Image (cartoon, rainbow, N blue to C red):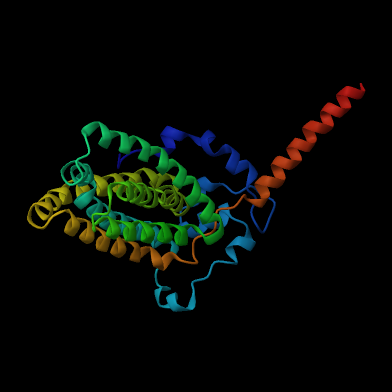
């Protein structure tokens, strides 16, 4: 996966619409995204000038000005490594918690996980809507913080009905930011390097997640599930910290003005052609 060649797999046709529609802010010539080799060039090509003018770190984060756009994929990768380590500690032990502490049957456990999958899909949509108002980074942090807080509540062994609700909410909050993080990587990484960064993410979840599950097993054996979940929540909070440096520097995903105008003009041309044909 690390050596995956996006250019050979996707070809120029995969971004033909983007290349034809996007216009440079200073001229009327098309912007060739394939020639953008830096994060700043990619952002300038994908977003309007008025959107870019809004990019500015809050005053309390000015000390992180040395972290540039080109560093954002590394920031997300470090966050993923920490997050995957924490997830591996506890995620495999929820089913054992349901079976050993609450006496849920294997059929019931699988039923809960099946319903949870649908719930995650709903939360992904909600996270996307929230990101359009708060921005992708703030939305990611919000959902991750809520998810970690819910895990702390789970560690107190609430009643079964409340536990299931908390599990649904926690899983939805922790998985909903994944598409947002992926979209940030796609914005700041040139096309030729996207396969490498996807491989880094898979490596993080594969190695760190599977490796830490062994440690999680020892924690459960020695101290119980509540300690395992509490430690995981702390790690989740720590994993969210690197993303703070990106606040104010990642454009809010909006419909790009030039693309909207071009589609509208095309639709009007089609309608005019139909009207002309009807008159003939």
* Residue at 22% across, 43% down: 98
- Residue 148 placed where, x, y %? 32, 59
Task: Left or right? Give the position of 134 relative to 234.
Answer: right
242 to 254, vertically: above or below: below
Q: Is residue 256 visible?
A: yes
Front one among 143 and 225:
225
Q: Residue furthest right?
A: 279
Front one among 44 and 144:
144
Q: Residue furthest left?
A: 222
Quadrant of the frame with the N terminus = top left
167 to 156, vertically: above or below: above
Task: Left or right? Give the position of 130 relative to 237.
Answer: right
112 to 140, vertically: above or below: above
Task: Left or right? Give the position of 225 relative to 170.
Answer: left
- Residue 234 placed where, x, y %? 25, 63
Residue 26, image quadrant: bottom right
Quadrant of the frame with the C terminus = top right
- Residue 40 placed where, x, y %? 50, 60
- Residue 188 placed where, x, y %? 45, 54
């Amino acid at each position: 996966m690390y050596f995956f060649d996006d250019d050979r797999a996707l070809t120029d046709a995969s971004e033909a619409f983007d290349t034809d529609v996007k216009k440079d802010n200073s001229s009327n010539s098309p912007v060739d995204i394939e020639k953008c080799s830096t994060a700043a060039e990619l952002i300038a090509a994908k977003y309007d000038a008025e959107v870019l003018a809004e990019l500015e770190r809050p005053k309390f984060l000015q000390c992180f000005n040395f972290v540039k756009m080109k560093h954002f994929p590394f920031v997300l990768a470090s966050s993923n490594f920490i997050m995957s380590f924490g997830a591996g500690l506890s995620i495999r032990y929820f089913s054992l918690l349901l079976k050993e502490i609450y006496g849920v049957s294997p059929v019931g456990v699988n039923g809960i996980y099946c319903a949870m999958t649908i719930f995650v899909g709903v939360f992904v949509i909600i996270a996307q809507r929230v990101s359009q108002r708060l921005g992708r980074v703030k939305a990611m942090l919000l959902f991750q913080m809520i998810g970690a807080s819910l895990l702390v509540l789970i560690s107190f062994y609430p009643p079964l009905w409340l536990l299931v609700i908390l599990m649904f909410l926690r899983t939805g909050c922790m998985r909903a930011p994944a598409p947002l993080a992926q979209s940030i990587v796609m914005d700041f990484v040139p096309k030729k390097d996207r396969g490498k960064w996807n491989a880094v993410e898979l490596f993080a979840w594969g190695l760190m997640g599977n490796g830490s599950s062994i440690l999680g097993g020892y924690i459960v054996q020695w101290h119980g599930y509540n300690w395992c979940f509490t430690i995981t929540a702390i790690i989740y909070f720590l994993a969210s910290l690197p993303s703070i440096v990106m606040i104010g520097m990642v454009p809010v995903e909006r419909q790009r003005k030039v693309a909207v105008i071009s589609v509208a003009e095309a639709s009007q041309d089609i309608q005019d052609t139909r009207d002309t044909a009807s008159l003939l």
